[in-house]
Image (cartoon, rainbow, N blue to C red):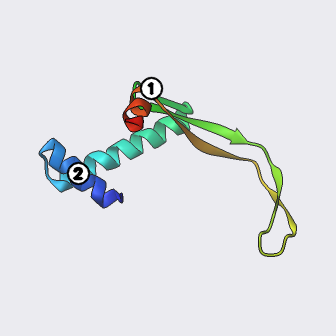
Amino acid sequence: MTKADLVGVIAKVAGITKDKAAKALDAYEETVTKELKKTGKLVLVGFGTFSVVKRKAREGRNPQTGKAIKIPAKKVVKFKAGKTLADKVKK
């Protein structure tokens, strides 16, 4: 599903225009991003938890040449599904 598809579904389910649904989705994305930058964690009970984790620097391989390369440390976003979401997906 693309972002445009998601906006269409949100608009239909909520009974609003696609423009309003797009603004709501953009606001959601912006809010999640700001919160992760600020505190490193966002919990949506039943849906899941977004968190920021640090990856250590490590050595990897260039798949084309096989040559060893250094992969720098970085922060990445992790998502853990909540029980309610996980149970609904299983069914």
Question: Residue reaching furthest front?
Answer: 91
SS class, disc 2: helix
Residue type at numbered disc 1? Lys
The amino acid pointed to by label 2 is Val
Going from N to C along the chain, the mark reached first, 2 or 1, is 2
* Residue 41 or residue 39, whichever sits in front: 41
Residue 69, percent from left and from top:
84, 63
Q: Position of residue 34 (x, y in %)?
A: 47, 40
Q: Secondary structure beneath disc 1? A: helix
Residue 75 in the image: x percent, y percent?
66, 44
Mark linked to residue 83: 1
Q: Mark 2 packing: few (<14 Cα in 10 Å), some, or many (20+)?
A: some
For image coordinates 37% across by 33% down, the residue present is 88
Q: Between residues 32 and 82, which one lies in front from this camera angle? A: 82
Going 57% across and 33% down the picture, which residue do you hit? 40
Q: Nearer the viewer, mark 2 or mark 1?
A: 1
Reading the image, the residue beneath label 2 is: 9
Crowd around label 1: few <14 · some 14–19 · many ≥20 (10 Å)? few
Residue beneath the point at 44% across and 26% down: 83
74 lies left or right of 9? right
Label tally: 2
Q: Is residue 5 above or below residue 46?
A: below
- The CA span between labels 2 and 1 is 24 Å
Considering every residue shown, the one lying at the far left of the view is 15
Name the quadrant containing residue 18. bottom left
Q: Position of residue 46 (x, y in %)?
A: 39, 26
Q: Which quarter of the image is occupied by the N terminus?
A: bottom left
19 to the left or right of 25? left
Residue 13 got which mark?
none
Identify which residue is drawn at 69% across, 40% down: 54
Choose between 47 and 35: the one closer to the eye.
Answer: 47
